[in-house]
Amino acid sequence: MREATLPPPRRHGRLVSRLVLLAAACFAFGFALVPLYDTLCRVVGFNGKTLKDAIAAGDVAPGGLDASRKLGVQFTTTLMPGLPWEIRPLEPSIELHPGELRTTRFLVRNLSDKPIVGQAVPSVSPTVAAKYFKKLDCFCFTQQTLAPGESREMALTFIVEREIGPEISELTLAYAFFPAPPPPSGSTQ
């Protein structure tokens, strides 16, 4: 009788090494997404990154006022489902000169009987104008907590840089307000 011989055990060392390298590469890519996203937002002006980073870097210096032309700026708001707030700009539209520093306010009211946390996400259109719209101070930089029935005026201080192209005479700053998880205990708004 012959004994059945089994094939020698395969060595999977090469395969395991490749899988470990692939897992490490995926982790590194996921880790690098945050700075890549921040860089993309800074370049195209999404989510208010442009000005926040410029303030931290100290490169927000108005190049002066361009009194030779005016721009129209409109403000709009949208509430996402699950956020029982009332929000409206106190000035739905304004005119300004490029390079002019302006402050406007939004009125927000919590319509519910419990504290609600919300977050505003800005967008500027036309998109090419976003890199010239610089928010110096904005309620959109942090989450906002409103007590039941509380009303609050929230300020936005901004500048539209004078380098904005002459083809742009109107732009819109739109805020989408989302419900947000409450901030960690011990933090204040």
Image: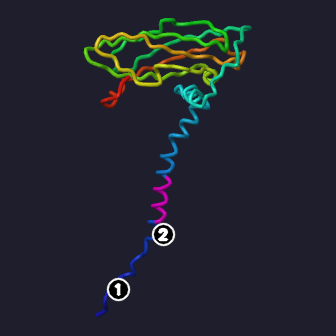
> Callout 2: few (<14), some (14-19), or many (20+) C-alpha neighbours within 10 Å?
few
Check residue 59 for magenta coloring. Answer: no
In screen coordinates, is 2 left or right of 27? left
| Quadrant for the N terminus in the image | bottom left
| Secondary-structure class at tag 1 | loop
Q: Which of the two discs, 2 and 1, sits closer to the camera? A: 2
Q: Is residue 18 above or below residue 122?
A: below
Is the residue 74 above or below the residue 28 in the image? Answer: above
Sooner in the amino-acid sequence: mark 2 or mark 1: 1
Residue 30 percent location from the top left of the image: 48, 46
Q: Amino acid at mark 1?
A: Thr
What stretch of residues is rendered in magenta?
17-25
Q: Is residue 24 magenta?
A: yes
Seen from the viewer's position, the closer of residues 60 and 124 is: 60
Disc 2 is placed on an element classified as helix
Outermost residue to the left: 113
Which residue matches tag 1?
5
Dot label at residue 14: 2
Horizontal and vertical percent position of residue 73: 59, 11
Residue at the outermost bottom position: 1
